[in-house]
Image (spheres, grey):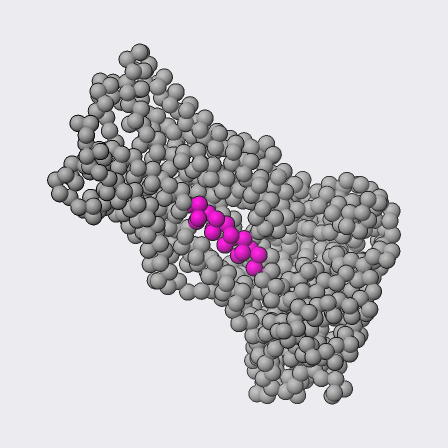
Amino acid sequence: MNVGGLVIGFTIGIAVLLVVYSQLSYDSQHVDSRRIYEAYIFSNGPDGPGIDNQFDYSAGPVIKAEAPAVERSARFVDGGSHLMYKNKSLDIPVMMADEDLFRMFTFKVVKGNASNPLGKLTDIVLTEETAKKIFGNEDPIGQQLRASAGEKLQAYTVSAVVKDPQLSTVKFEMLTRIENRGDYTTATNRWDNHMLALYVELKEGRTQQEAERQLRQINHRYQADVYTDLAKKGVKPDQYGDIYAARLLPLREAHFSVRVNGHKATSYMMVYTLLLVGLLVIAIASFNFVNINLATAFTRGREIGVRKCLGAGRNRLFGQLWYESFMICALAFVLSLLLTNVLLHTIDGIQKMNVPLGEILLNPKFLALAVVMLLFVSLVAGGYPSWLMSRFNTVETLKGRLGLKRKSGVRSSLIVAQFVIACVMICCTFIVYRQFRHLQEADLGMDKSFLVSIPLREPEKGRETVEKLRTMLASDPRVLSVSGSNINFGRGADRRTVSITTGFDYKGKSVSTDRAWIDYDYLRTLGIRLVAGREFDKSYGTDTADNVLLSESMAKQLQEKDVVGKTIIPDGETKGMHVVGVFADFHLYSMEQEMRPLTLSFAKGGIDYCFVKTTAPGAIGLMERLKKEMSEIEPGQEFRATFVDENVNNWYTGERMMSLFFSIAAAIAIVLSCTGLLAMVLLIVNQRVKEIGIRKVLGASVRQISVLISREFVLLVALAVVIATPLSWLIMSKWLQEFPYRVSLEWWMFVMVGGTALGLALLTVGFHVVRAAMANPVKNLRTE
């Protein structure tokens, strides 16, 4: 029980600590990370403060040129996901950035131009994995390929191959210059086209506050109209005196800043919750170790008495007994390292995190931390029993008069602590799982069942591709409708997530909306309810890029009595949007974000995804038909169709991983707690076996004896349940606050968890107590 309990505890604990260590090590590989910042925009609007982490093309070069504290800047934007090499067509995301990116961030170049990988406009940088995927065993350096540059394909030459960036906020599979993007020339002087991330590196000795003051001056110089508009609306400055400002977030905080980076960030709460889980599992294993050592200490009384008679002092005895504990801990630790390696390659949730956990395991810092943990656990868990045993009275031990006390404050406290931790973990597991299921199964305002999403190779020909597929499938009874959009629903095989937000003033009111461009039959294909007007329909023949559909919340912002048929012209503009219909609000993005107003525009181009609505009986079989038809429309293109309900599940990878960790930890916690309880019951029953025999001879029933012996343990578990219930409620209510859509905490959840813990404790204690109570008393008393 000692070795097994420690192995289980150490294995789970180390696995969790590895994940936490990897998360807290984000961006540490970048040599100048302390001088690098992610820029974001703060706006104190009429409806309260807002954060936007996307900038326009102009911001980067202007900030670099006009902010004395800034040494370099790098813009970072999605360029598409299509690649052509010889006759091979692949979907691999292409990111686009400034030349300075490689001077700011540390990416290890393993082949090619290490001094300036993006020195030429035609240069493209690949990661090792991407290079192998495209070229196999060929040398990639100098190879020609064509890849996305916005809505078009462009020729590139491979200039360098870098080690896959893993623990980095800035990640890419293919990277080229931002100037190649199709809309760069037309949008390069605009300040209202927010679409890219911006990073800046400060000069040595310059401070964040100094740089932000200079950015504030640049904002006033180039975006004076924004300040004027906000002032007209009576917006008040925040505590820093800003109504609108570009601010900086240290790079080492970017991975954890949910406020700036939204659902893309990993919250500190999740990381520290996992850390707490790992430490608690180790604590439970250590409590077991202490309790069992305390119990078995009294079986070694004569040995310790003899050692003392032969001259062993307290310090010598303590050293020997602690050394034995340390060797047991060390053996368990080595075994747990081997099991951890197996665990990390088995659990799907950990594999998908894409972090080099094997390298971290061999990292000297992590190994030093692990050894310190081993010494600490062995000292705490083995030290107290060793100290207690070294103080035994020599005469009493040799007479055999030492025994395990029926009541012990330390032992009782440890049992209560174990079950408090186990109950909290069970409760957290149950509520995390319910929240995960709630996010998965909640009504999104659309019908995602039997809906297929197909990434398209050439978005600029997207409408043409969708129309061809619509024609080919027109006679197939399994197909209900076909449509397309520039935004996928959920996270599909191409792993891309696109978010487009715009704002404008209308009749003196500030309006903000998400945007998407769609094809005919979009609402019908996704099962979205039309409230008023019509959706885009080719039978009308009048739909243009100016025609839009508005969600109910978007129409409400405009405060028009009947918005259908009206042309909405933003203040100060001459051209507007013609509203042809209003639809019911639905969640275009994850339910980790609040549902926002949405505007759907008719797309003349730029369709990235085709949606096919099918019937339940034909859903699986239709995939083969779709693969065949798409191979004719886009020859050589990899078929990467997915079901939208699977894409939606991919939104919640973090919650799934957390649920997995809690489930494993809770199972281990309750097993270890029951194991420790079992060990104590066996030892106490063994010591009281003659007492049980005498009670039976004097007429005590099996029930009376069972209640007498088990009562103390059941009361300890009941106390643990009482302590764990409010603690669990506090922890989970705090965690649930992160979600705009969440489950409610109800009393029956905690009653169920408490009942489960008490039931398991009764099963653990009851079987052995009843067996002892039913034993033949003559057998136990005949030696007297």
Residue at 63% from the left image edge and 87% from the top image edge = 533
Location of residue 418 (image quadrant): top left
Residue at 47% from the left image edge and 57% from the top image edge = 432
Residue at 54% from the left image edge and 44% from the top image edge = 20
Image location of residue 772, percent across then percent down: 25, 40
Location of residue 496 (image quadrant): bottom right
| Furthest residue in direction left, as rendered | 698
Judge whether 372 appears above or below 57 on screen. Answer: above
In the image: residue 661, left or right of residue 779: right
Location of residue 285 (image quadrant): top left
Tell me the quarter of the image containing the N terminus.
top left
Q: Nearer the viewer, residue 261 or 95?
A: 95
Image location of residue 402, percent across then percent down: 23, 26
Total label count?
0
| Furthest residue in direction top, as rendered | 310
Judge whether 29 appears above or below 594 on screen. Answer: above
Residue at 51% from the left image edge and 52% from the top image edge = 660
Secondary structure mostly seen in the magenta stretch: helix
Magenta residue check for 667? yes
Looking at the rendering, the stretch of residues picked out in magenta corresponds to: 651-669
In the image: residue 710, left or right of residue 293: left
Image location of residue 161, percent across then percent down: 78, 45
Magenta residue check for 675? no
Residue 22 visible to the viewer: no
Judge whether 165 appears above or below 457 on screen. Answer: above
Tell me the quarter of the image containing the C terminus.
top left
Q: Nearer the viewer, residue 562 or 752?
A: 752
Judge whether 621 appears above or below 366 on screen. Answer: below
Image location of residue 732, percent across then percent down: 42, 56
Residue 86 visible to the viewer: yes
